[in-house]
Image (cartoon, grey):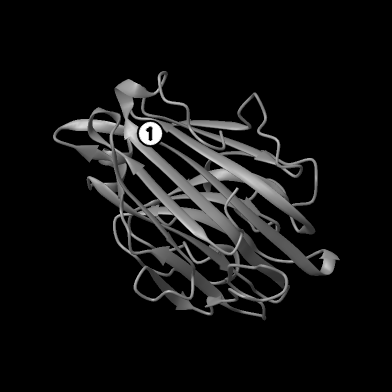
Amino acid sequence: MRTALALLVICLLAHGQELHCELGDWSDTARVALFGSAHSLAGTSDSVLLRLVEERSQAGAGFLKQRLPLRRRGEKLSFSCRVRFRIHGLRGSDGADGLALLLLPEMGLGGQGGGMGFFGLERGLAVEFDTWQNPEDADGNHVGFQRDGSMSSAVARPWPEPLNGGQLWTAWLDYDGTRALLELRLSSDERRPSEAALRYGVDLVEALGCDEAVVGFSAGTGDAVNLHDVYEIRWTCHPATAWELLDVPGR
């Protein structure tokens, strides 16, 4: 397994052939772009790759400059993603506001607090790990999919464990380009669950209005604070028709 100080991007495109494999970290400005309060912690003893926010009333985001292909030569692609992150409430689990994994047509930073660095962006999709109940939320500890800079979830579910309890989370986001279906899995013990926690039907090419998306993370705080830290992200991209044939690392 690659070190948690590294960021691995693998794209397998036309006919299942590997086009490139790049390795970097969030301190490498040639490969990443940081916005707002986000800053690299690569090389620290805790092996944190990226800290998004850590004080009151902040918003931060970090993006890969390497774009994720969603369609090539008219063929829609599928992808699988694995991320590792930690949210640590500074007042126990009573911390705000949460972290989001972003798929956007262009890099950008939205509002702080419950906006989690995503609110107000004109177009995009966010996978939210929300730790604070705002007026738009059914509860204060849930995962969900959000669209086009909205603070309301397109689909969401409460999570039984505190998301900001300080444990290391592993999330898997899988997209089937043929069925236009996103699936999210989440675990605190690094074992991939057999069943998806959430499913959301969306054609990402149409939703984002582009053939290649930018990928990143964002987070926000208000009066209450979490530490929002990213440890690892790994992408694998391949033709949608090869979904059942490809052995995806880390799935």
Q: For mark 1, give the secondary structure.
A: loop
As displayed, is residue 44 above or below residue 89? below
Q: Is residue 200 visible?
A: yes
Quarter-wise, where is residue 214 in the image?
Answer: bottom left
State which quarter of the image contains the C terminus: top right
As displayed, is residue 76 above or below residue 218? above
Question: Which residue occupies 81% across, 64% down?
Answer: 94
Residue 222: x percent and y percent? 65, 74
Outermost residue toward the top in this view: 244
Quarter-wise, where is residue 78 in the image?
Answer: top left
Q: Quick one: 134 or 2, which is closer to the camera?
A: 2
Question: Which residue occupies 58% across, 32% down?
Answer: 198
Q: Amino acid at mark 1?
A: Val
Q: Residues within 10 Å of mark 1 (few under 14, many from 20)?
A: some
As displayed, is residue 88 above or below residue 239? below
Q: Quick one: 101 or 124, which is closer to the camera?
A: 101
Q: Quick one: 235 or 3, which is closer to the camera?
A: 3
Outermost residue toward the right in this view: 92
Residue 192: x percent and y percent? 66, 33
Q: Is residue 178 visible?
A: no
Question: Which residue occupies 49% across, 49% down?
Answer: 234
Outermost residue toward the left in this view: 73
Q: Quick one: 114 or 77, which is closer to the camera?
A: 77
Say which residue label 1 marks: 202
Quarter-wise, where is residue 108 in the image?
Answer: bottom left
Circle count: 1
Residue 248: x percent and y percent? 48, 32
Residue 17: x percent and y percent? 28, 34
